[in-house]
Amino acid sequence: MSDRLAVLPQYLLPKQALTALAGKLASLQGGSLTTAAIRRFVARYSVHMAEAANPDIASYATFNDFFTRALKPGARPLAQADLICPVDGAISQFGAIDKDQIFQAKGHRYSTTALVGGDAQLAARFDNGHFATLYLSPRDYHRIHMPCAGELTRMVHVPGDLFSVNPTTARGVPGLFARNERVVCVFESADGPFVLVLVGATIVGSMATVWHGLVNPPRPGTLRQWDYAAGQVRLGQGDEMGRFLLGSTVVMLFPQGPLRFNPQWAPARPIRLGEEMAQRVS
Protein backbone atom coordinates (compact mmCIF):
# COMPACT_ATOMS: atom_id res chain seq x y z
CA MET A 1 0.00 0.00 0.00
CA SER A 2 1.39 3.43 -0.89
CA ASP A 3 1.96 5.98 1.87
CA ARG A 4 -0.55 8.37 0.30
CA LEU A 5 -3.21 5.65 0.36
CA ALA A 6 -2.28 4.62 3.90
CA VAL A 7 -2.92 8.13 5.24
CA LEU A 8 -6.18 8.68 3.34
CA PRO A 9 -8.39 7.76 6.36
CA GLN A 10 -6.76 10.57 8.33
CA TYR A 11 -8.30 13.13 5.97
CA LEU A 12 -11.73 11.77 6.89
CA LEU A 13 -11.36 11.42 10.66
CA PRO A 14 -12.73 14.16 12.98
CA LYS A 15 -9.20 14.81 14.25
CA GLN A 16 -10.01 17.94 16.27
CA ALA A 17 -12.88 16.24 18.11
CA LEU A 18 -10.85 13.09 18.80
CA THR A 19 -7.97 15.16 20.13
CA ALA A 20 -10.22 17.23 22.41
CA LEU A 21 -11.80 14.04 23.77
CA ALA A 22 -8.41 12.42 24.33
CA GLY A 23 -7.21 15.50 26.19
CA LYS A 24 -10.20 15.39 28.55
CA LEU A 25 -9.81 11.67 29.22
CA ALA A 26 -6.08 12.00 29.85
CA SER A 27 -6.69 14.65 32.52
CA LEU A 28 -9.30 12.66 34.43
CA GLN A 29 -8.46 11.25 37.86
CA GLY A 30 -9.83 7.76 37.38
CA GLY A 31 -8.24 5.95 40.31
CA SER A 32 -7.78 2.25 39.56
CA LEU A 33 -8.99 2.73 35.98
CA THR A 34 -6.24 5.29 35.35
CA THR A 35 -3.64 2.97 36.89
CA ALA A 36 -4.85 0.08 34.74
CA ALA A 37 -4.68 2.22 31.60
CA ILE A 38 -1.12 3.32 32.43
CA ARG A 39 -0.03 -0.27 33.13
CA ARG A 40 -1.42 -1.36 29.78
CA PHE A 41 0.31 1.53 28.01
CA VAL A 42 3.64 0.74 29.69
CA ALA A 43 3.38 -2.90 28.64
CA ARG A 44 2.21 -2.11 25.09
CA TYR A 45 5.01 0.37 24.35
CA SER A 46 7.76 -1.07 26.59
CA VAL A 47 8.14 2.18 28.52
CA HIS A 48 11.31 2.22 30.67
CA MET A 49 9.83 3.22 34.01
CA ALA A 50 13.13 2.52 35.78
CA GLU A 51 14.39 5.82 34.27
CA ALA A 52 11.52 7.82 35.74
CA ALA A 53 12.02 10.01 38.78
CA ASN A 54 8.86 8.32 40.09
CA PRO A 55 8.64 4.72 38.82
CA ASP A 56 5.48 3.91 40.83
CA ILE A 57 2.72 3.61 38.22
CA ALA A 58 -0.05 3.64 40.84
CA SER A 59 1.05 7.06 42.13
CA TYR A 60 0.12 8.94 38.93
CA ALA A 61 -3.28 10.58 39.40
CA THR A 62 -3.89 11.14 35.67
CA PHE A 63 -2.58 9.75 32.42
CA ASN A 64 -1.14 13.19 31.65
CA ASP A 65 0.86 13.10 34.90
CA PHE A 66 2.36 9.79 33.79
CA PHE A 67 2.97 10.89 30.23
CA THR A 68 4.87 14.03 31.22
CA ARG A 69 6.84 12.23 33.96
CA ALA A 70 10.27 13.53 34.86
CA LEU A 71 13.47 11.50 34.54
CA LYS A 72 15.80 10.59 37.38
CA PRO A 73 18.60 13.11 37.94
CA GLY A 74 21.57 12.14 35.77
CA ALA A 75 19.53 9.86 33.48
CA ARG A 76 20.50 11.98 30.46
CA PRO A 77 24.02 13.39 30.80
CA LEU A 78 24.78 16.28 28.45
CA ALA A 79 27.45 15.87 25.78
CA GLN A 80 30.17 18.46 25.31
CA ALA A 81 28.68 19.92 22.14
CA ASP A 82 27.56 23.27 20.77
CA LEU A 83 24.10 21.80 20.13
CA ILE A 84 22.71 18.83 22.04
CA CYS A 85 19.72 16.69 21.12
CA PRO A 86 16.70 18.22 22.92
CA VAL A 87 14.53 15.08 23.12
CA ASP A 88 14.31 11.31 23.25
CA GLY A 89 12.93 9.91 20.01
CA ALA A 90 14.04 9.20 16.47
CA ILE A 91 15.46 11.30 13.65
CA SER A 92 12.98 12.16 10.93
CA GLN A 93 15.26 14.34 8.77
CA PHE A 94 18.07 16.87 9.24
CA GLY A 95 20.52 18.85 7.15
CA ALA A 96 20.75 22.01 5.07
CA ILE A 97 17.84 24.30 4.28
CA ASP A 98 17.72 24.82 0.48
CA LYS A 99 17.16 28.60 0.34
CA ASP A 100 13.86 28.46 2.26
CA GLN A 101 12.88 24.83 1.62
CA ILE A 102 12.98 22.11 4.29
CA PHE A 103 13.14 18.46 3.26
CA GLN A 104 10.28 16.44 4.78
CA ALA A 105 10.44 13.14 2.89
CA LYS A 106 11.01 11.94 -0.65
CA GLY A 107 8.91 14.17 -2.90
CA HIS A 108 7.91 16.55 -0.10
CA ARG A 109 9.36 19.90 0.96
CA TYR A 110 7.85 22.88 2.76
CA SER A 111 8.94 26.45 3.36
CA THR A 112 10.37 28.00 6.49
CA THR A 113 7.81 30.80 6.13
CA ALA A 114 4.94 28.31 6.28
CA LEU A 115 6.49 26.55 9.27
CA VAL A 116 6.80 29.69 11.41
CA GLY A 117 3.25 30.83 10.68
CA GLY A 118 3.72 33.14 7.68
CA ASP A 119 6.38 35.51 9.04
CA ALA A 120 8.64 35.89 5.99
CA GLN A 121 10.99 38.27 7.78
CA LEU A 122 11.65 35.75 10.54
CA ALA A 123 11.97 32.88 8.06
CA ALA A 124 14.52 34.80 5.98
CA ARG A 125 16.93 34.68 8.92
CA PHE A 126 17.25 30.95 8.24
CA ASP A 127 17.73 31.02 4.46
CA ASN A 128 20.33 28.40 3.52
CA GLY A 129 20.63 27.50 7.18
CA HIS A 130 20.17 24.15 8.91
CA PHE A 131 17.24 22.14 10.27
CA ALA A 132 16.52 19.04 12.31
CA THR A 133 13.17 17.25 12.59
CA LEU A 134 12.86 14.82 15.51
CA TYR A 135 9.96 12.44 16.13
CA LEU A 136 8.75 11.45 19.59
CA SER A 137 6.87 8.16 19.70
CA PRO A 138 4.33 7.32 22.43
CA ARG A 139 6.93 5.37 24.45
CA ASP A 140 9.40 8.25 24.64
CA TYR A 141 10.11 10.78 27.38
CA HIS A 142 7.99 13.78 26.38
CA ARG A 143 9.66 16.82 27.83
CA ILE A 144 11.64 19.05 25.46
CA HIS A 145 14.93 20.64 26.49
CA MET A 146 17.15 23.39 25.13
CA PRO A 147 19.74 22.43 22.48
CA CYS A 148 21.84 25.41 23.62
CA ALA A 149 21.47 28.38 25.92
CA GLY A 150 19.03 30.97 24.63
CA GLU A 151 16.85 33.96 25.39
CA LEU A 152 13.21 33.78 24.31
CA THR A 153 11.99 36.68 22.16
CA ARG A 154 8.66 35.41 20.81
CA MET A 155 6.17 32.55 20.93
CA VAL A 156 3.51 31.96 18.29
CA HIS A 157 0.62 29.48 18.43
CA VAL A 158 -0.28 28.58 14.85
CA PRO A 159 -3.66 26.84 14.35
CA GLY A 160 -3.77 23.95 11.93
CA ASP A 161 -4.64 20.34 11.21
CA LEU A 162 -3.91 17.46 13.55
CA PHE A 163 -2.58 14.71 11.30
CA SER A 164 -0.47 11.99 12.86
CA VAL A 165 3.26 12.78 12.61
CA ASN A 166 4.57 9.22 12.36
CA PRO A 167 7.00 8.35 9.53
CA THR A 168 4.28 6.97 7.24
CA THR A 169 2.27 10.18 7.51
CA ALA A 170 5.39 12.29 6.93
CA ARG A 171 5.88 10.45 3.64
CA GLY A 172 2.23 10.67 2.66
CA VAL A 173 0.97 14.15 3.66
CA PRO A 174 2.53 17.12 1.79
CA GLY A 175 3.81 19.91 4.04
CA LEU A 176 2.80 17.98 7.15
CA PHE A 177 4.80 19.95 9.73
CA ALA A 178 3.73 23.29 8.26
CA ARG A 179 0.03 22.40 8.21
CA ASN A 180 -0.39 20.83 11.65
CA GLU A 181 -1.08 22.95 14.72
CA ARG A 182 2.19 24.11 16.25
CA VAL A 183 3.92 26.34 18.80
CA VAL A 184 6.83 28.35 17.38
CA CYS A 185 9.44 29.47 19.93
CA VAL A 186 12.00 32.03 18.76
CA PHE A 187 15.28 32.36 20.66
CA GLU A 188 18.45 34.41 20.46
CA SER A 189 21.72 32.71 21.40
CA ALA A 190 25.38 33.63 21.50
CA ASP A 191 25.63 32.26 17.95
CA GLY A 192 22.54 33.94 16.54
CA PRO A 193 18.82 33.13 16.36
CA PHE A 194 17.24 29.71 16.41
CA VAL A 195 13.68 28.45 16.29
CA LEU A 196 12.23 25.48 18.11
CA VAL A 197 8.81 24.36 16.85
CA LEU A 198 6.55 21.99 18.79
CA VAL A 199 4.28 20.30 16.23
CA GLY A 200 0.92 18.95 17.39
CA ALA A 201 -0.69 15.75 16.14
CA THR A 202 -3.79 13.59 16.41
CA ILE A 203 -4.56 12.87 20.08
CA VAL A 204 -1.91 15.36 21.27
CA GLY A 205 -4.22 17.02 23.79
CA SER A 206 -1.99 19.99 24.48
CA MET A 207 1.46 21.52 24.35
CA ALA A 208 3.02 23.51 27.16
CA THR A 209 6.10 25.62 27.84
CA VAL A 210 7.82 26.27 31.15
CA TRP A 211 7.30 30.05 30.90
CA HIS A 212 3.65 30.03 29.79
CA GLY A 213 2.08 26.78 30.93
CA LEU A 214 -0.53 25.23 28.65
CA VAL A 215 -0.58 26.93 25.25
CA ASN A 216 -3.43 24.84 23.87
CA PRO A 217 -6.22 24.48 24.68
CA PRO A 218 -7.70 26.96 24.05
CA ARG A 219 -7.79 26.56 20.26
CA PRO A 220 -9.43 29.79 19.01
CA GLY A 221 -8.60 29.04 15.36
CA THR A 222 -6.55 32.22 14.94
CA LEU A 223 -2.82 32.86 15.21
CA ARG A 224 -1.74 34.06 18.66
CA GLN A 225 1.60 35.71 19.47
CA TRP A 226 3.44 36.63 22.65
CA ASP A 227 6.54 38.85 22.71
CA TYR A 228 9.11 38.78 25.51
CA ALA A 229 11.35 41.55 26.79
CA ALA A 230 15.11 41.17 26.92
CA GLY A 231 16.08 39.00 29.87
CA GLN A 232 12.50 37.94 30.66
CA VAL A 233 13.02 34.25 29.77
CA ARG A 234 16.54 32.86 29.71
CA LEU A 235 17.25 29.14 29.60
CA GLY A 236 20.51 27.23 29.73
CA GLN A 237 21.59 24.33 27.55
CA GLY A 238 19.71 21.22 28.66
CA ASP A 239 17.05 23.12 30.60
CA GLU A 240 13.47 21.97 30.10
CA MET A 241 11.53 24.33 27.82
CA GLY A 242 8.27 22.49 27.17
CA ARG A 243 6.37 19.24 26.92
CA PHE A 244 3.91 17.29 24.81
CA LEU A 245 0.87 15.43 26.07
CA LEU A 246 1.25 12.34 23.85
CA GLY A 247 3.75 11.92 21.01
CA SER A 248 4.65 14.46 18.39
CA THR A 249 7.54 16.18 16.60
CA VAL A 250 10.06 18.96 17.18
CA VAL A 251 11.49 20.97 14.26
CA MET A 252 14.52 23.22 14.79
CA LEU A 253 15.92 25.94 12.54
CA PHE A 254 19.44 27.37 12.73
CA PRO A 255 20.96 30.17 10.62
CA GLN A 256 23.45 29.84 7.79
CA GLY A 257 26.98 29.11 8.92
CA PRO A 258 29.40 26.23 9.37
CA LEU A 259 27.59 23.52 11.31
CA ARG A 260 28.55 19.84 11.40
CA PHE A 261 25.86 17.40 12.50
CA ASN A 262 26.82 14.35 14.50
CA PRO A 263 28.34 11.92 11.94
CA GLN A 264 26.45 9.06 13.58
CA TRP A 265 23.10 10.67 12.85
CA ALA A 266 20.88 9.26 10.08
CA PRO A 267 17.13 9.27 9.37
CA ALA A 268 15.20 6.80 11.57
CA ARG A 269 18.09 6.49 14.04
CA PRO A 270 17.01 6.47 17.70
CA ILE A 271 18.22 9.47 19.69
CA ARG A 272 18.42 10.45 23.35
CA LEU A 273 18.22 13.75 25.10
CA GLY A 274 21.67 15.21 25.75
CA GLU A 275 23.64 13.42 23.04
CA GLU A 276 25.66 15.47 20.57
CA MET A 277 23.53 16.93 17.79
CA ALA A 278 25.95 19.31 16.10
CA GLN A 279 29.16 21.28 16.45
CA ARG A 280 29.93 24.70 15.01
CA VAL A 281 32.96 24.58 12.73
CA SER A 282 35.32 27.56 12.82
Image (spheres, rainbow, N blue to C red):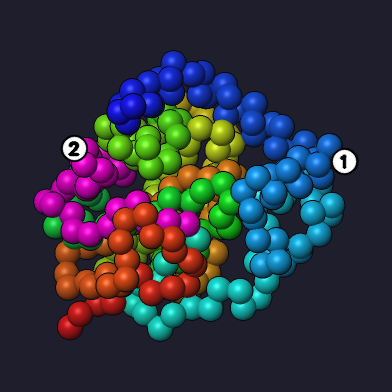
The magenta segment: 89-116
Which residue shows up at 53% across the image and 45% down it? 247
Quadrant of the drawing holding the C terminus: bottom left
Image quadrant of residue 194? bottom left
Residue 44 lies, in percent from the top left, at 65, 45
The amino acid type, in three-letter code, at marker 1 is Gly
> Circle 2 sits on which residue?
107
| Circle on res. 31 | 1
Name the magenta segment's main secondary structure.
strand
The amino acid type, in three-letter code, at marker 2 is Gly
Residue 7 lies, in percent from the top left, at 38, 26
Which residue shows up at 34% across the image and 39% down it? 170
Measured along the vertical axis of the image, is residue 107 above or below residue 260? above
Looking at the rendered structure, the secondary structure element under dot 2 is loop
User: Is 259 situated left or right of 176 in this image?
Assistant: left
**Number of numbered labels in the structure image:** 2
Measured along the vertical axis of the image, is residue 190 above or below residue 168? below
For the residue pair 269 and 232, the one nearer the viewer reads as 269
Cα gap from disc 1 to disc 2, whole angstroms: 47 Å
Looking at the rendered image, the disc whose residue lies closer to the viewer, 1 or 2, is 2
Measured along the vertical axis of the image, is residue 3 above or below residue 251? above
Residue 124 lies, in percent from the top left, at 17, 51
For the residue pair 278 and 148, the one nearer the viewer reads as 278
Which residue shows up at 58% across the image and 24% down it? 18
Residue 98 lies, in percent from the top left, at 13, 52
Upstream in the sequence, badge 1 or badge 2? 1
